[in-house]
Amino acid sequence: MEVQEETINLNSKKVSELLRAGADVNAAGGQYGSAIQAAGYLGRDAILETLFNYDVDYNSTNAGSRNPDGQTALSLAAESGHNLIVRQLLARDGIKADLADNNGRTPLSWAAGSGDGWSVIEEFLKRSDVDAESKDRDGRTPFSWAAENGRVRVVDLLLKRPDIDPNTSDTNGRTPLSWAAGNGHHEVVNLLLKREDVTCDRADVDGRTPLSWAAEAGKGLVVDKLLGKSEVNPDREDKEGKTPLSWAAEKGNKDVVYILLFHADVNHSSTFPGSVPPLWRAAMNGHDGVVEVLLAAENININHKNKGGTTLLSWAAASGRDKVVKLLMAKEGLTPDSPDRSGRTALSWAAETGRGAIVEILLKRSDVNPNSVDHSGCTPLLWAAMNGHSAVVELLLAKGVNPNSTDNSGRTPLLWALINGHNDVSRSLIRKDTTTLHSLVQDGDRALTELLLATGYDVNRCDPGGTTALRLAIRRKDREMVELLLENGAVTRGVMANEWLDVYGRKQTDIIQLLEGANGQKHVSFIERSTLANTPAFSMDEKRLVVFPIDWQRPDELILDEMRNTGINEFRVFYAKVNNHATRVSVLLWFPDGNDPFPQQEYFNMPRWPSTCIAWTILSPSNPHIRPWQSVDYYSMLPNGWIPDDGIDFFQQIVLHLEERWISRLVQLRSEGKNPDLMRQLAQDAQKWTELRSILQDHTDTAQKFIVEYSQRYNANRFPKDLQNTVDEFKAKISHRLDQLDQTIRDLLQFEFAWASINESRVSTRLGHNVMLFTYVSIFYLPLAFCAAIWAIPNIADSDTRNPFIITSVIVGFITLLISFNLENITTLGWRLYEGWRTTVLELTFGMVAGRILVLEIGGQGQESGLSKEVMVPPKTFDGLVNHQDIEVELRYITSDKDATIPPC
């Protein structure tokens, strides 16, 4: 080992001393295996001569750390290009010039592949013990190694030998030309291509040709020379389906791509099933310059899809390759919204991976659908929200995408962001979403609903159908969800009292209490009447609504002493001071009369209304000129189940309720029926209109007075426009209905008179018919009486006396029977003559069109029974009634042929 170390250190003196001292000249180990192997690798020719003097093993194949394959000193010297040492060793007797190392490589192989002196090669080739075509374990010959390493003179030297096969292939099937082309040794390639026996397009075991290797390595000169050979196929695919163009594109060899594209026969796409086109390979490996070159080629397929149906645009969008996306988008013929097998588009992939710049580019195209849905039901917005890409979410929302889209599991983008904890995305979507809360309420998911509301979601937001989440929870009778929404400030306006009872499974006679705190939280409870007096007193921090059953008769909790004398059809407002800081306002409505002595009207089904009361407490502010009094405590017999905004709103509710009662009262004339006393009933109702107008005036005066007094006293002189408009509309609407019904009564009375006259005429006509029939019957019996009387005549047995009487009886009987059998036809003929005379008289009397009769349908449509009259009326009366909304008028011609209906006037 010491000898080897001193050899490495080039200390020839020390080497001599060690050897004289008896050191082992062939000691194995160390870096190179032995001292002679070190001398051969390092070119220590002087020390080598010293080692020759001490019985050194020239053919030592010891392995070392730097000589792991066990190369001999000759191999190491040949590899390192130490020609002098090679000659020194070849000159020694017993040298094995063709001894291979552990990989099977001989000294000639190493010299051909890496030696600098071609003259040494000649020394090896002169020896008979050296095989010029020896192959190593990889099947490679010295010629192959020389070609790979571009040893032009060595290649030329070897090619001159008849025993050298220029097409010999190694275990991988690669030829010397393949190795030279892959390493860009164009001079070696030239030498080989000049030979006619060299196969230019031979493929290795992987199907790769010399052109393929040259294209991968970017050796433009070699590629150009190979393309000049006619037998070279520029589109030959290897076992991976890669063509030379594919390899050049994948490696980013732009110059080689230019050369290949310039060749007219080069195909831009691979035909191998499932292979990746050159354009894809360039893009996937980040070679944007090559992508640009390929896109400039004619007939390039930019919409090619891989096995999964993905386009290059989709891949680039998902990978964040902005430059590739821009290049593709600028190319005509691109289909930017082409879906893959899962239904996903480029925008979908860009949104999922958060590629904001690419999303912005794609959204500028009109042929890109921002609301595209894949097979899982996901939209680009949903993918972006699911993965927390807030910038992409903002871009999509600005484009106007549907924020309420749901996937196949029914989850919205907001819900996915909420579940995955993407708070920034949640805040963006909350502004637009209108269905997530409703979806959670529909599913009864209390935990996620609570989480959603904690993010600041508007609990009162309506879905596209105008329904709030609270209304949906009430409809589902989900008590826990209703309470959660109320705790989060859900607005109760529009909820009726009976709905609260249904949700909580209470009886219709229970008293409802709805509390609202200062922060908007609400709570529904139910109290017994006996404990009503013990409920907490009102305060400035909360509001309360207590709803009594509508069928209660004036609960004592609502009625002040002065209110007990209120009469029927009255609408009154009362004020009572509770203490120095609070006032109770009470309103009583008793209209229509709820104590009708008749259980049910005979002609008109009129609902019987009990009296209705509301009351509320208002608290005075510290400075009444700064803000109005605060309404805090509400008691109600209205069907409404929500806390009013203030006293003004509460009074507006009862005004609307009053309007409802008025309308119900006035629609009674739309009820229909038939009764002989109809005329008397109509006349009685006509007398009531004056009284009703007086009641209406009283009700509106009360409302107007309340507006003025309440605004001055408790609302800081702020007059409520909404309430004033409600009162005005109420008065105008009811007055108009009264005018219509007034006219209806007058018209109906006129029709009833005409109807009665016609009925009397018909009675007279029927009496005449009866007399006529009696006469016919009498005539029928007269011949019989005559025949009976014949036998009382003297000498009746005499033929001269008997025959005239018999002949006369037969004739009279025949005439009587003829009349009797045709009595109906004779009657009809007589009636037609009468109708003709009657029509002529009516035309001359009333100026009507001959043959026209007025058929009246009195009452609204859709009733179960009606008044149907056929009457004759003067034209002026007819003109005033045909357009009346409560009377349907039909004109009918009565002719001898048939009835024909005239279109409405």
Image: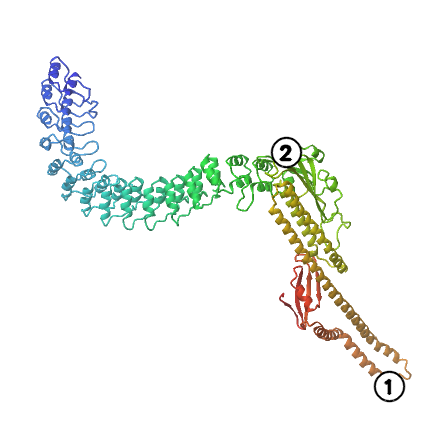
Q: Is residue 309 visible?
A: no
Q: Secondary structure at mark 1?
A: helix
Give the spatial CA distance, label 2 vs label 1.
Answer: 127 Å
Q: Secondary structure at mark 2?
A: loop
Q: Front-most of 565 and 681?
A: 565
Q: Front-most of 697 and 255?
A: 697
Is residue 785 shown left or right of residue 498? Answer: right
The single residue placed furthest to the right in the displayed view is 794
The single residue placed furthest to the top in the displayed view is 21
Are the two marked residues, 2 and 1, in contact with CB atoms closer than 8 angstroms?
no
Identify the residue at image location x=88%, y=80%.
790
Is residue 288 shown left or right of residue 196? Answer: right
Which of the 4 image quadrants contains residue 84?
A: top left
Name the mark on residue 799. Answer: 1
Q: How many marks?
A: 2
Judging by the rendered image, the residue that carries numbered circle 2 is 539
Quadrant of image for the C terminus: bottom right
Q: Is residue 614 visible?
A: yes
Which three-letter amino acid code belongs to the residue tagged 1?
Ser
Q: Mark 2 vs mark 1: which is more N-terminal? A: 2
Q: Front-most of 394 and 82?
A: 394
Quadrant of image for the N terminus: top left
Q: Position of residue 676 (x, y in %)?
A: 77, 60
Q: Position of residue 273 (x, y in %)?
A: 32, 45
**Label 2 crowd (10 A; few <14 / some 14-19 / many >=20):** few
Identify the residue at image location x=89%, y=83%.
796
Which of the 4 image quadrants contains residue 89?
A: top left
Name the mark on residue 305. Answer: none
Which three-letter amino acid code belongs to the residue tagged 2?
Ser
Q: Is residue 793 above or below residue 524?
A: below
Q: Position of residue 87 (x, y in %)?
A: 9, 27
